[in-house]
Image: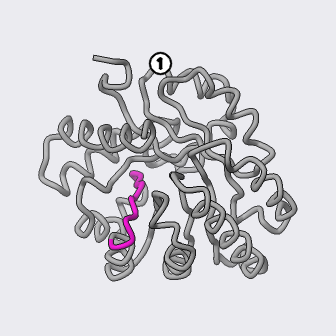
């Protein structure tokens, strides 16, 4: 059995470079055999993450331009475009219509549309997508650009209605979920609607509330418990199923 096949957690959306000790966070994921998608929030942050992940069996660094930073970092879109062909992994990208970030929403839409159009042209991208109060708008862009045809959209912390979840399934989306979101009614609706084969665990570390799991990358035990209970499975079986899905996406 290869290292990649060995048991271990899956953290399909976390910010290793924003942890207190970035190198220790990378080392921890590697030691835990944690299949990890280390998203970035700006294109300038990608080079260091890519270098850190270069010799890793389990961690993949993703190129991102976070919607919450578009107001200050939209000028980095040109750098994103230069770097996009160098990686299969894109994230964190998306839209955020929360009150604090709504003033930049029109610019966010332009950036996100450009990002997904580029990914569609390049093809074979795994894309971790942020969607605060923007489920419909995000899915509209996924569909309009054709990203669902040539890439794999993974919807991070997707708080949406059942109809929007079903639409996302029809577009081939996967869903990365964490313990905190699964405690909410929308999180339970998602698990009631999505087949286990489309579910991945995440922590969004270091940004989850201290009262839930996700205090460090790979801390998905609580999420696995909730997912397994929702599907009526043994916890170990659920963990193995999610790991197989992650391996398929990360090793392609």
Is residue 31 left or right of 118 when viewed as pictured?
left
**Any part of residue 133 in sight:** no
Q: Position of residue 82 (x, y in %)?
A: 78, 50
Q: Is 251 displayed left or right of 228 in the figure?
A: right
Q: Residues within 10 Å of mark 1 (few under 14, many from 20)?
A: few
Q: Residue at x 24, y 55 (%)?
A: 196
Q: Quadrant of residue 114?
A: bottom right
Q: Position of residue 43 (x, y in %)?
A: 76, 49
Nearer to us in this view, 130 or 248: 248
Residue at point 61%, 66% (across, down): 116
Residue placed most toward the observer, 125 or 64: 125
Any part of residue 143 in sight? yes
Q: Position of residue 220 (x, y in %)?
A: 39, 40
**Seen in the image, is 140 located left or right of residue 2?**
right
Q: Residue at x 55, y 23 (%)?
A: 56
Element carrying mark 1: helix
- Asked which quadrant contains residue 247, the reply is top left
The image shows residue 35, relative to residue 66, as above or below, that is above
The residue where tag 1 is placed is 31
Q: Which residues are magenta?
A: 170-179
Vertical relation: 38 (above or below) 80:
above
Quarter the N terminus occupies? top left
Q: Is residue 151 above or below residue 12?
A: below
Q: Is residue 163 magenta?
A: no
Which of the two residues, 248 or 213, is positioned nearer the viewer here? 248
Q: Is residue 178 magenta?
A: yes
Residue nearest the observer in this picture, 101 or 151: 151
């Amino acid at each position: 059995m290869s290292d990649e096949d060995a048991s271990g957690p899956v953290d399909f959306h976390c910010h290793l470079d924003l942890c207190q000790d970035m190198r220790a966070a990378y080392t921890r994921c590697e030691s835990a055999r944690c299949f990890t998608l280390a998203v970035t929030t700006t294109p300038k942050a990608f080079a260091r993450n890519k270098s850190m992940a270069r010799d890793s069996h389990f961690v993949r660094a993703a190129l991102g331009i976070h919607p919450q930073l578009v107001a200050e970092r939209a000028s980095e879109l040109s750098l994103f475009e230069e770097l996009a062909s160098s990686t299969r992994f894109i994230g964190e990208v998306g839209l955020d219509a929360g009150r604090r970030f709504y003033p930049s929403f029109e610019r966010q839409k332009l950036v996100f549309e450009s990002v997904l159009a580029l990914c569609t042209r390049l093809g074979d991208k795994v894309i971790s997508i942020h969607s605060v109060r923007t489920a419909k708008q995000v899915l509209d862009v996924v569909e309009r650009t054709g990203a669902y045809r040539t890439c794999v959209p993974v919807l991070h912390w997707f708080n949406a209605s059942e109809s929007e979840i079903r639409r996302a399934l029809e577009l081939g989306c996967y869903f990365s979920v964490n313990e905190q979101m699964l405690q909410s009614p929308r999180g339970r609706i998602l698990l009631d609607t999505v087949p286990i084969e489309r579910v991945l665990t995440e922590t969004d570390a270091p940004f989850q509330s201290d009262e839930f799991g996700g205090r460090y990358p790979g801390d998905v035990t609580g999420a696995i418990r909730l997912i397994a209970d929702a599907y009526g499975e043994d916890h170990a079986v659920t963990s193995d199923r999610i790991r197989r899905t992650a391996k398929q996406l990360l090793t392609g």
